Image (spheres, rainbow, N blue to C red):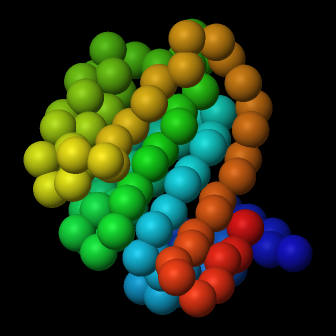
Amino acid sequence: MFITTNDKTTLFEDELLKNFNSYKNCIISVGFLSEEKLTSFRDSFLDIAKKGQFILIFGWSRDATENLVKFLKNLNQDISAINSKSGIYLSTETFHGKVYSFYDDKSAKV
């Protein structure tokens, strides 16, 4: 179990970064990520797309600002330009899911 805190870096984020570096593929399904968090993981998302496949399923939220939507669209273009099987998918319904899965030919972690 990983517990997040209000600190700039957390055990959970450290674990995510370790897995981004260790695996070729990643599927993330979350209800919401701030633009700040998306920016902090942007390079990791792009690196995964270069190695294998990266998919982010993002739950639509009424809290999503116009700037966040624009950011997601731009990030999606960058990711899919690297790997056409990678990208960001926006749900038309709000959901509160939080699944982070990493996998390659030898192992997987959820």
- Residue shown at 33%/42% (left/top)? 87
Query: Which image quadrant for residue 54?
Result: bottom left
Query: Which image quadrant for residue 29?
Result: top right
> Picture coordinates of residue 62 (x, y %)?
57, 11
In the picture, measured across the screen, residue 96 lies left or right of residue 20, that is right
> Picture coordinates of residue 79 (x, y %)?
23, 49
In this rendering, the answer to whether 78 lies above or below 67 is: below
In this rendering, the answer to whether 4 lies above or below 93 is: below
The answer to whether residue 3 is visible is: yes
In the picture, measured across the screen, residue 84 lies left or right of residue 95, that is left
Q: Nearer the viewer, residue 89 or 17?
A: 89
In the picture, measured across the screen, residue 17 lies left or right of residue 36, that is right
Query: The N terminus is located in which quarter?
Result: bottom right
- Residue shown at 69%/75% (left/top)? 109
Q: Residue furthest front?
A: 105
In this rendering, the answer to whether 47 lies above or below 101 is: below
> Picture coordinates of residue 55 (x, y %)?
44, 48
- Residue shown at 26%/38% (left/top)? 76
Q: Residue furthest right?
A: 1
